[in-house]
Each structure stands twice: as structure tokens, then as C-alpha cells.
Amino acid sequence: MTLTNPLHTLVMGALSGVSQAAGVMIGKRLGADDARSAYQDLSCLWKSAYAW
């Protein structure tokens, strides 16, 4: 467990950053009352998440 802690921390940090960025991107589109673009961004992010 001790040897994998740095790797685990890096992966969790990266995923946390990506999720926060996704929230900002979707929130920006929804705030601009552009639900169609928000849905397109969301579907693109889902596809990227499944590919990763």
C-alpha cells in the first residue's frame, strides 16, 4: 500500500481537476442559457471518460 500511495494520489488529483473543469464548462453554457451546447459538451465529456 505504501508504494502505491503516490500513484493513487496523482490519479485522484487529476480526476478531481477534470471533474471541476467539466463543471465549469457545463455551468458556463447553462448560465448563458445555451442548453444545447451544454448537452453536446456533456456528451463529449462522457465519451472521453469512457475512453479513458
Image (tube, rainbow, N blue to C red):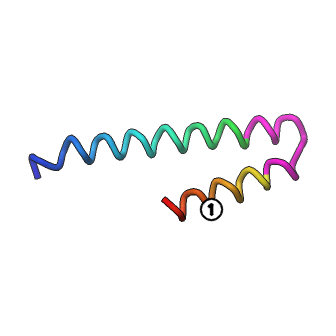
Give percent across and percent down for residue 22: 62, 43
Amino acid carrying mark 1 in the image: Lys
| Residue 50 pos. (x, y %) | 54, 64
Which residue occupies 38% across, 39% down? Answer: 13
Q: Is residue 23 left or right of residue 17?
A: right
Would you say residue 34 sits in the magenta stretch?
yes
Secondary structure, mark 1, is helix
Asked whether, in this view, residue 29 is left or right of residue 34, the answer is left
Q: Seen from this angle, which residue lies furthest left?
A: 2
Q: Residues within 10 Å of mark 1 (few under 14, many from 20)?
A: few
Please identify the quarter of the rendering in which residue 28 is found.
top right
Q: Position of residue 36 (x, y in %)?
A: 88, 52
**Residue at left 83%, top 35%?**
31
> Which residue is at a point 26% across and 47% down the rendered structure image?
8
Q: Is 8 displayed left or right of 51 in the figure?
A: left
Tell me: 17 left or right of 21: left
Q: Residue at x 28, y 41 (%)?
A: 9
Count of numbered tags:
1
Q: Which residue is mark 1?
A: 47
Q: Which residues are magenta?
A: 27-38
Question: Does 12 lie within the magenta span?
Answer: no
Q: Looking at the picture, tell me which residue is in the foreground, 52 or 26.
A: 52
Q: Please, what is the dominant secondary structure of the magenta stretch?
A: helix
Q: Position of residue 26 (x, y in %)?
A: 72, 43
